[in-house]
Image (tube, rainbow, N blue to C red):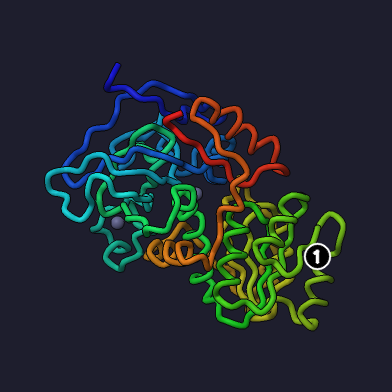
Amino acid sequence: MIDKMNALRWHGRNDIRIDEVAIPKVNSGEVKIKIEWCGICGSDLYEYKSGPLFIPESKSHPLTGRKAPVILGHEIAGEVVEVAHDVKEIQVGDRVTVEPIRSCGTCVQCNEGYYNLCSNRGFHGFDGGGGGLAEYTTCNADMVHKLPKKMSMEQAALVEPLAAAIHAIRRGRFAQGQTAAIFGTGPIGLALISAVKVAGAKKIIAVEIAEKRRKIAKEFGADIVLNSNEEDVIAEITKLTDGQGVDIAFETTGVEVSYNNAVTATINSGKIVVVSLWGKEIEINLNDLVLTEKEVIGSIAYRDVFPVTMTLIAEGSIKPEKMITKQIGLEEAVEEGFNELVVNKDENIKILVNPSK
Ligand SMILES: [Zn+2]
Ligand SMILES: [Zn+2]
């Protein structure tokens, strides 16, 4: 069956499968990519265990016209193997990564340039328009970025989580010389440590309970890594910041106590950037913000930061590849990828999948 390929698809919560599907055809404006590596993201795990959040389950997505089952995977690195007749800027043979945001281009947000907030927003790898956990994917040429020569395909698969971190520090208006606390040091937490470090943080404090992740947080540039199971995180951060608290805190865990610690550990008028996704509501006291003029800021995905992210990685200012703990084939992706990341959080950080294997 020459026109079929294997793909990992989300059918429903707790139900992902390797299916045989049709190889996608290139439509006008599109390119076709043979995937070399695709990372499994925290948001993929969220959809697997708590979704759907971004996946259209019962109603078709407005931009793709599709609904579940959908192909997962949005941390994409691969080579262009076909381009539509009207695509000029991307050519066959280009090594690329995909900025996986699908936007309508006509809504108020799109007109402002806030394409990551498009009112019809879709994410490639969630919205039914294809994904990276398949041998091939097609997408609009304007979602594709050519890799710098010096960038490896593994690095290319890590551009997306790094871009999310760069966007988050922009959202938090992070400035050189500030102190930062990063709550949770999974892929996004590690990316944030790299991002604030390259942006000139004075002190980086990470908070993490998993032993292996604590060690890697240090390697990524955290000055101090606190274990919230063993230490009084607030007292320690206060001590480490001359009694003031950090200028900015990043919440990446989606855990209530971690969010509240992030708020408490931040200086008055400081900022708390929330990058995590939340499976349920949490209890907060708004006086913690009103009486202190602290700002809580949401951050979703990225806009206009893929080029700078790729430059930082290619020139070696950010070295993300240490977060890769495992590289597997598509056949193993459910057990050795998704389930492994859910069950064995302590041992794994980023798992890359090669869909051709
Ligand atoms: Zn991701
Ligand atoms: Zn739009």
Looking at this rendering, what residue extends furthest in the left direction?
A: 85
At 48% from the left and 48% from the top, the residue drawn is 154
Q: Position of residue 29 (x, y in %)?
A: 18, 47
Q: Is residue 131 above or below residue 194?
A: above
Mark 1, secondary structure of its residue: helix
Relative to 60, 170 lies left or right:
right
At 26% from the left and 48% from the top, the residue drawn is 140
Q: Position of residue 258 (x, y in %)?
A: 71, 58
The N terminus lies in quadrant: top left
Q: Nearer the viewer, residue 227 or 321?
A: 321
Q: Is residue 129 visible?
A: no
At 37% from the left and 53% from the top, the residue drawn is 99
Relative to 83, 215 lies left or right:
right
Circle 1 residue: 233
State whether label 1 is within 8 Å of ligand 1: no
Q: Position of residue 217 (x, y in %)?
A: 69, 59
Relative to 211, 128 lies left or right:
left
Relative to 65, 344 lies left or right:
right
Q: Nearer the viewer, residue 69 or 219?
A: 219
Q: Is residue 308 visible?
A: yes
Q: Nearer the viewer, residue 71 or 314?
A: 314
Q: Is residue 229 above or below residue 178?
A: above
Q: Amino acid at mark 1?
A: Val
Quadrant position of residue 93: top left
Q: Nearer the viewer, residue 10 or 221?
A: 221
Looking at this rendering, what residue extends furthest in the top direction?
A: 1
Q: Is residue 343 above or below residue 237?
A: above
